[in-house]
Structure formats: C-alpha cells, structure tokens
Image: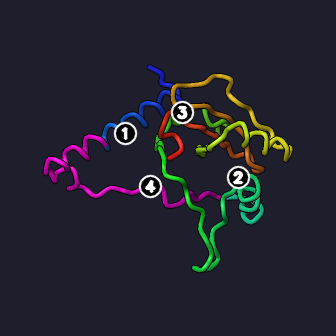
Amino acid sequence: MSISRRNLLLGTSTLAVLGEAAAGEAQAQGDTRANTRERVLGIGGMFFKSHDAKGLAEWYEHHLGINPTPSDYGQAVWQQTAGPTVFAPFPQDTGYFGRPEQTWMINFRVRDLDAMVAQLRAAEIAVKVDAKVYPNGRFARLLDPEGNPIELWEPAGPNAHS
C-alpha cells in the first residue's frame, strides 16, 4: 500500500491534535500517566552540509526570512511560529525528494503561499505550485541554490497559522 506525502501530513496532523486532546482530558481527570514519559518539544535545529555554507545561509535569510545561526549570544535566532510539524522517515528508494542521492527535504509552513511564491518568482527563483488543493492545505516546490528540495506548505483549517 502506498501513502502520499499529503495524506501522511494530514493523518499525522490529525493524530497530533487527537493526542493533545486526549492528554488534556486525561490530565483534567487527574490522570498523570499522560506525563510520565519525557518527549521532545520540537525541532531545535536543522543541520546539513553545504558547498558554500555562508552563501547558502544568506540565500535562506534573503528569500525565506530565516535568520542565520547567531555568531554570539546577543543575536536573535530564527523563531518558528507554533503549528503542526511532521517528522516522517521515508523509504530509501523514494522519489519524493527529487534526485536519487538526495537524503533529506525540508517542508516550511507559510502563511500565504501565493504571496511567498510571487516573492520568490520576483527574485527569479523557479517555484512549482501543486495545482491540487488538499484537505490539509496547499503545496509548492523549489530548490535552493545547491539543489536541495524545499516544500512550502500553507496549512488549511481554522488553526492553520497558530
């Protein structure tokens, strides 16, 4: 059975919401078992090799608004907006990331996909918008200057941009 990336995102987001609701209900009823296991709070960083780390960091800052890693503790680090995050290993032979040797892909949540796409295209960056609107939102694809795949996701629903 094959599952699409978008269905995976939808299912994972739904399970996360249901899990949070169940944990909240258990806690309200005095059940502390929901909090007996420690768990991570979110992604603390994304680290990958680059042929031109400084130049690539500048590209991400200029085109996607991601602050580069601070060089001292007085500088601001990029802050994510809270919202759904999917953590999903894929089969080794997936074609979803593009090139066969590509071992990772990042998916960024965006507030307004059309505005982001227009901004990137104005900078002469090729972006392919998926024409289909999925129950969990809309998607677009682009590559960074080193050919790394980036997926942009505008979540659907009332809590999409929380």
Label at residue 160: none
Q: Give the magenta part as a residue range.
A: 21-49
Which numbered marker is on residue 17? 1
Q: Dot 2 lies on which element? A: helix
Position of residue 10 relative to residue 142, above or below, is above
Residue 76 percent coordinates (x, y): 61, 71
- Pointer 2 residue: 64
Q: Which of marks 3 and 4 is nearer the N terminus?
A: 4
Q: Which of marks 3 and 1 is nearer the N terminus?
A: 1
Asked if the residues shown at circle 3 and circle 4 are in contact, with their CB atoms under 8 angstroms apart, the answer is no
Question: Which three-letter amino acid code belongs to the residue tagged 3?
Answer: Ala
Q: Earlier in the sequence, mark 2 or mark 3?
A: 2
Question: Along the polypeptide, which appears first: circle 2 or circle 1?
Answer: 1
Which numbered disc, 1 or 4, marks the residue that appears first in the sequence?
1
The residue that appears at 13% across and 51% down in the rendered structure is 30
Assess whether mark 4 and mark 1 are in contact (beta carbons under 8 angstroms): no
Q: Name the residue under label 3.
A: 156
